[in-house]
Image (cartoon, helix red, strand yellow):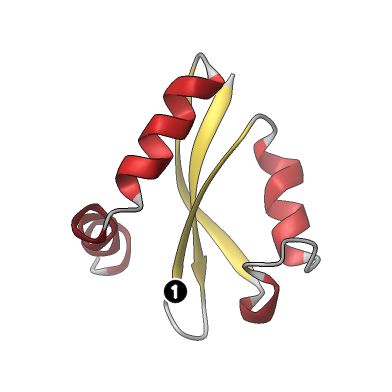
Amino acid sequence: MFYVYFLKNASNDRIYIGSTENLSIRVDRHNKGLVRSTKAYKPWTLIGHEKYSTRSEAMKRELFLKTGQQREILRKKYLDK
């Protein structure tokens, strides 16, 4: 199983979108500062994820969600509650 996941930084409401095969290990790596693109903004909280059967499907969805308009939709869904 592959996942597209959404992380939120508590201090500035930054959203990070990524994909992985092992969700718990990947979130842990983000919070330990082992991911270059997110280490300056830790700690991160997992706010959502989607499951896919292939890596290809997950990567396509991740790229789609990283577009400006889709990122804003995610922001409204998870942050404007």
Q: In the picture provided, is 44 more to the left or to the right than 32?
A: left
Residue at the limit of the structure toward the bottom, as seen here? 11
Q: Residue at x 31, y 42 (%)?
A: 64
Q: Relative to 11, is 20 above or below?
A: above
Q: Position of residue 41 (x, y in %)?
A: 61, 78
Residue placed at 25% from the left, 61% from the top? Answer: 68
Which quadrant is home to the N terminus? top right
Amino acid type assigned to the residue bearing label 1 in the image: Arg
Q: How many marks?
A: 1
* Above or below 52: residue 63: below
Quadrant where the C terminus is found in the figure:
bottom left
- Seen at 68% across and 52% down, the residue is 27
Please name the residue shown 50% across and 45% down the image: 5
**Residue 30 image offset from top left, x and y in percent:** 70, 60
Residue on which disc 1 sits? 14
**SS class, disc 1:** loop
Q: Position of residue 26 (x, y in %)?
A: 71, 46
Tell me the crowding category of disc 1: few under 14, some 14 to 19, or many 20 or more residues within 10 angstroms, Cα based: some
Q: Is residue 78 left or right of residue 23?
A: left
